[in-house]
Amino acid sequence: MATFKIQRYNPEKGAKPYIKTYQVPIEPGMSVLDCLFYIKENLDASLTFRASCRMGICGSCAMYINGLPRLACETQVSSLGTETVEVKPLPNYEVIKDLVVDLTPLFHKHEKVKPWIIPLDPVELDQPTLEYYQSPPQLEDYLQFAYCLKCGICLSACPTVATDEEFLGPQALAQAFRYISDTRDNGFRERIQIVDTLHGLWRCHMAGACAEACPKGVDPALAIQLLKRRAIFGQKKVQARLLQPPVEPTPRPGIPKAPEPTLKKK
Ligand code: FES
């Protein structure tokens, strides 16, 4: 059995947050999220939390587990090494109910940095006739930052967000870097104007807590440092070339030819 100490809070009832204790029978392979579902289904249906994919993809189940922000579905109870598991909502956000926090500031800040490709050629993006060529090293420049789940964990780990709620924060800044590093993008000036501000990238104190907490191994602290460099020295000049897509795939040595299609084109 494991003891779960969970912070409960229902603003509609006007009560202050309090801790409620539950006993959960643990089986090998159980995650903290499995235990929360056990509690909801067997002990207390009023317990409120968010979850969706249960496989570390959607980012919904981010919460504060044993003093660290983590994904509940990715956290094995056995890996915590304690008989008592403390679960609280993510810090640095307003609590809506129990373990559910209001992620509006996260999405609002994310949206501010224009997290989409601002095309070199808008016509080509809407009605493509050619392909953007991006080499593997150019992809590597931003790939790890594209793994961001938008779970909000980095903002809850960040000491600067805790003291300056207007600070854009590691998630938005890392995404700003992700897009300006993409050779298909043409939004460098627009984004630098947004991040090179009072509550922008220079507010980062380089605590590195965001990078340690990220469940996907993204390093927003690194992105912020690289972004500072770009803010000072300007954009890298390399931009993606438009190429004619190959009509027939080039056969690679050692790979057998694909079988003939069973359905013929009309
Ligand atoms: Fe989707 Fe945990 S439920 S990341």
Image (cartoon, rainbow, N blue to C red):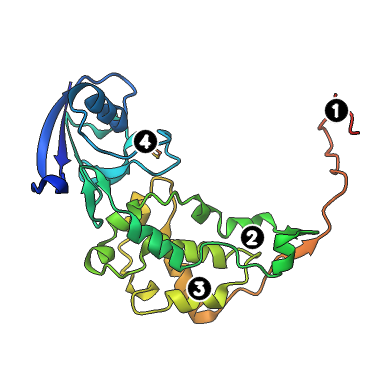
- Which of the 4 image quarters holds residue 74? top left
User: Which mark sits nearer the N-terminus, 4 or 3?
Assistant: 4
| Residue 221 in view here | no
**Residue 88 drawn above or below residue 241:** above
Local SS, label 4: helix
x 8%, y 46%: residue: 15
Local SS, label 2: helix
Q: Amino acid at mark 2?
A: Gln
Check if mark 1's residue and mark 4's residue have beta carbons within 8 Å.
no
According to the image, label 3 marks what residue? 191
Horizontal arrangement in the rendering, residue 241 relative to residue 152 (left or right): right
**Residue 110 drawn above or below residue 263:** below
The picture places residue 133, in percent across and down from the top left corner, at 74, 59
**Residue 222 drawn above or below residue 81:** below
| Residue 189 in view here | yes
According to the image, label 1 marks what residue? 261
Check if mark 2's residue and mark 1's residue have beta carbons within 8 Å.
no
x 15%, y 47%: residue: 12
According to the image, label 2 marks what residue? 138
Marks 4 and 2, how far apart in space?
A: 31 Å
The picture places residue 188, in percent across and down from the top left corner, at 56, 74
